[in-house]
Image (cartoon, helix red, strand yellow):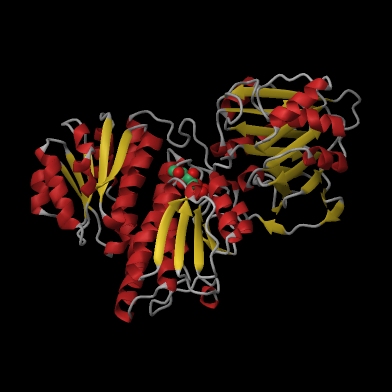
């Protein structure tokens, strides 16, 4: 949810922390702060100095003068408990000012702990649950054992980094929220995720739940239930440039244009020459699915809906897409029950919970994720990795298309169609990156349409069958990136209510590739036209009847009818981008949102 960074080394921590926080700012950007051990080791009067700002890391950078000292922690916040303000920004100190803490997660028993601590004389300054941790840690002392005892009092998930006055190390710990240690040369870092440590680390360690790590410039010691443990070191395969904009004005635009490459990576090595799919997960050794749930939140739930339409078309197995938060207490099932958890971050609290609940209920659980070392991969039996690469912009684009293709591949492995159809689909999948490339090359027309939409107050998006979720996803993105109130509807539903809102100022985007839903979509579009609303048709053929009723027709490259959501979504993304740009929106960091939602 929020971003954490920590640095211990020979250089001043402040600039390293500011750069690190900048890279993880997509995780939270309503306020930020740093705590630095002012002075160098051996200098008698060292104390913890804190600097905070409301807004972005650049605001903090501008407001903060130099602070000498090579040990520090920092945080970018997405407010949960307590409004976004300087007082509520992390790091939080205890009342002596000798303990500073940054925290991701939630202290579920913070009211109770706060009351207890108050009775023992602690005075609180902020409204946050995190401040409770600083006071608690102060009581138990700076040793790993003390930190473990303090954390044993805490209910709820956490990832923390702590600075104790007088110490030349940072203590990091986790339970339920991720935190990593970046390993450098004579210097080490702590981070909520890999971009936080990229500048100085060439390897990193994922802490496990219950680990307490003491991170100094010369090394890292990890203890688990009092015992020293070793954790696997991963190599950093990216350079800092992966989280640069690469010449684009926004990460969102860069990530939209990366999609042809991403789809090639997602497909690579997974389809044989004759069209057989093998994800390499040993799925053929499992009891085949008799009932299959597809679960995700937000855009991932839309991807799950596309997956439902695809898998249901390939088999008679009962397939159901659900918002992960709606999978409450799944019924106990035998090995034929499968739950597929769709989550790019692998950290979305509702999806991780659904994975655990489904597993407890006896389902085989498969995580479709972009982050192989995430909470969901610990919770699920197997992992289907999306290979989309780091996505920085808060709105998902390339990871959404990778989720769609990941679900297509899963469907084709589980329920392979007849030889001819299988080869046809495999060929269409291989051509999909090229089709997306061609759709993105239509940027000038999509820019013109997106810019025109910027003047609208409301918009409708309609689709049918496998493109109904595309309508939902498009509307989701217009809200999120362009702050345009857009609603997605199944085309047949309009006349059952939403027509009441339709007027000549309500543009309607119709997603209508030439598949077996086309004729019905045409009827809906004619009904809309009769009510005077301007229509933008996204189709894959130049069609005379559409030209006469739609204000604009976008002729997208054709693909297999099952894969049209990939191409039409790419076109919608560009329209949304240009609409957001024209409306002056903070494209990569929409207000009130964060990249991964690790709270309920
Ligand atoms: C929308 C968006 C969100 C995510 C949702 C789930 O653009 O990005 O709706 O899709 O928060 O996130 P993951 O896939 O990380 O579980």
What residue lies at 52% left-to-right and 74% top-to-bottom?
Answer: 287
Q: Nearer the viewer, residue 574 or 370?
A: 370
Q: Position of residue 97 (x, y in %)?
A: 80, 23
Residue lying at 82% horizontally and 56% vertically, measured from the top left? 229
Q: Position of residue 598 (x, y in %)?
A: 58, 42
Please say whether residue 231 is visible from this viewpoint: yes
- Residue 94 lies left or right of residue 285; in this view the side is right
Q: Quadrant of the N terminus?
A: top right
Q: Nearest the camera: 370 or 15?
A: 370
Number of on-image labels: 0
Asked if 368 appears above or below 289 in the picture, the reply is above
Residue 549 picture location, percent across and down:
10, 44
Tell me the residue at 70%/31% (across/down).
110
Q: Is residue 115 above or below residue 434?
A: above
* Left or right of 527, for residue 380: right
Residue at position x 12%, y 43% from top? Answer: 527
């Amino acid at each position: 949810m929020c971003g954490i960074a920590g640095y211990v080394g020979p250089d001043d921590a402040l600039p390293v922390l500011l750069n690190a926080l900048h890279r993880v700012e997509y995780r939270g950007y309503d306020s930020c702060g740093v705590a630095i051990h002012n002075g160098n080791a051996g200098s008698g009067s060292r104390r913890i100095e804190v600097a905070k700002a409301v807004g972005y890391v650049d605001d903090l950078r501008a407001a903060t003068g130099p602070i000498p000292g090579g040990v520090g922690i920092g945080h970018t916040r997405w407010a949960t408990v307590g409004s976004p303000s300087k007082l509520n920004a992390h790091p939080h100190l205890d009342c002596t000012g000798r303990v500073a803490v940054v925290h991701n997660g939630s202290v579920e028993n913070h009211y109770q702990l706060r009351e207890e601590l108050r009775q023992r004389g602690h005075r609180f300054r902020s409204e946050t649950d995190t401040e409770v941790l600083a006071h608690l840690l102060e009581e138990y002392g700076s040793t790993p054992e003390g930190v473990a005892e303090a954390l044993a009092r805490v209910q709820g998930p956490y990832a923390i980094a702590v600075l104790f006055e007088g110490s030349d190390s940072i203590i990091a710990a986790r339970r339920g929220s991720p935190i990593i240690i970046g390993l450098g040369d004579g210097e080490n870092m702590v981070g909520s995720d890999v971009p936080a440590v990229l500048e100085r680390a060439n390897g990193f360690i994922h802490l496990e739940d219950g680990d307490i790590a003491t991170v100094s410039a010369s090394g890292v010691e990890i203890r688990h239930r009092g015992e020293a443990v070793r954790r696997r070191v991963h190599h950093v395969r990216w350079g800092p440039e992966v989280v640069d904009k690469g010449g684009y004005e926004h990460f969102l635009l860069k990530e939209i244009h990366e999609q042809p490459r991403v789809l090639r990576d997602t497909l690579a090595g997974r389809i044989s020459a004759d069209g057989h799919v093998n994800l390499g997960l040993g799925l053929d050794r499992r009891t085949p699915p008799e009932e299959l749930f597809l679960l995700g939140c937000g855009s991932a739930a839309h991807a799950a809906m596309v997956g439902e339409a695809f898998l249901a078309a390939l088999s008679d197995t009962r397939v159901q897409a659900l918002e992960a938060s709606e999978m409450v207490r799944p019924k106990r099932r035998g090995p034929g029950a499968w739950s597929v958890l769709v989550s790019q971050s692998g950290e979305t609290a509702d999806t991780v919970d659904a994975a655990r609940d489904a597993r407890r209920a006896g389902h085989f659980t498969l995580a479709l994720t972009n982050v192989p070392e995430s909470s969901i991969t610990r919770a699920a039996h197997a992992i289907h990795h999306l290979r989309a690469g780091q996505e920085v912009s808060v709105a998902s684009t390339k990871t959404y298309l990778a989720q769609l293709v990941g679900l297509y591949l899963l469907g084709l492995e589980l329920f392979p169609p007849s030889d001819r159809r299988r080869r046809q689909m495999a060929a269409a999948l291989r051509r999909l990156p090229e089709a997306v490339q061609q759709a993105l090359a239509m940027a000038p027309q999509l820019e013109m349409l997106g810019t025109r939409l910027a003047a609208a107050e409301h918009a409708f998006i309609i689709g049918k069958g496998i493109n109904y979720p595309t309508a939902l996803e498009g509307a989701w993105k217009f809200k999120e990136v362009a702050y345009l109130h857009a609603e997605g509807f199944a085309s047949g539903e309009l006349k059952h209510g939403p027509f009441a809102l339709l007027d000549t100022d309500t543009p309607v985007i119709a997603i209508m590739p030439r598949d077996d839903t086309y004729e019905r979509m045409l009827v809906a579009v004619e009904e809309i036209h009769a009510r005077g609303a301007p229509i933008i048709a996204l189709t894959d053929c130049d069609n005379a009847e559409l030209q006469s009723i739609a204000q604009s027709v976008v002729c997208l490259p054709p693909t297999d009818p099952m894969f049209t959501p990939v191409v039409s979504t790419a076109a919608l993304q560009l329209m949304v981008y240009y609409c957001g740009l024209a409306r002056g929106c903070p494209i990569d960091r929409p207000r009130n949102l964060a990249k991964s939602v690790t709270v309920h």
